[in-house]
Image (cartoon, rainbow, N blue to C red):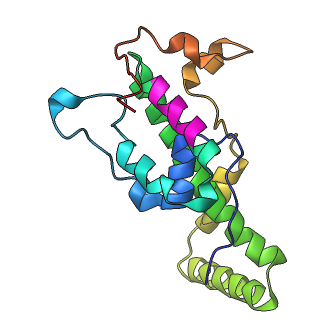
Amino acid sequence: MAVPAMEPRKNATFPELVFHFLGTEDANTPDNAPTPEERSPLYGILGRRHHELLKHVKKCGKTRLKRAWDEWVRIGQYKNGDGQRKQLWANASSWMGRRKLYLELEKGVNGTEEEEEEFDLKWKKAGNKEVTEKRDWSQFEDFEIMYEPDYLDIRDPLYEAYSNKPNPDKTLGSKIFDLTSWDL
């Protein structure tokens, strides 16, 4: 059964676009530089390969992709940029997990009659299995993530703890890469 599309935010980060349009498997495949000497902000946990793949996804939008990619590369030019990019990737990964659960709940509550019956049957089976095994109702732990706050825009989670107005750019450190238009 096809999962209905939920578009990422208008100002989505590069990892959000990769997870949404390319999928979790591709987002979990790092794009390492061809050689160690070519280490640059164009490669890493996500990189140039992912960008090239997204260029062929019409629904992604050229403007949105350009803005997200430019910001991804900019962050990667700094000493602490890799850490912040990993945090953005982790945020997007968490977002995909939440999205999957939300869509499952949405089908169970507002889906077609068949989808609602399928949802009820799935969770009744899980509940019966847990009752017969005399376990706690741990099946509901799957949905606990839906109650946790979501900080998709925070690049440095420690910075948020120290300030009411987080500015992750202040934690990037010194610039270690300079790129020209030829690099991009």
Residue 173 visible in the snapshot: yes
Residue at screen point 59% across, 60% down: 58
Decide whether the magenta segment is chiefly helix, strand or loop.
Answer: helix
Looking at the picture, tell me which residue is in the foreground, 71 or 118.
71
**Magenta-drawn segment:** 66-75
Q: Residue 53 lies in what quarter of the image?
A: bottom left
Vertical position of residue 154 compared to residue 47: above or below? above
Vertical position of residue 28 compared to residue 79: above or below? below
Asked if the stretch drawn in magenta spans residue 72, the answer is yes
Location of the C terminus (image quadrant)? top left
Location of the N terminus (image quadrant)? bottom right
Looking at the picture, tell me which residue is in the foreground, 56 or 161.
56
Residue at screen point 74% across, 15% down: 164
Q: Which percent across, then down, holds residue 84?
A: 48, 27
> Is 102 left, or right, of 132 in this rendering?
right
Q: Which percent across, then down, holds residue 12?
A: 64, 42
Q: Which percent across, then down, holds residue 149?
A: 70, 40
Residue 91 visible in the snapshot: no
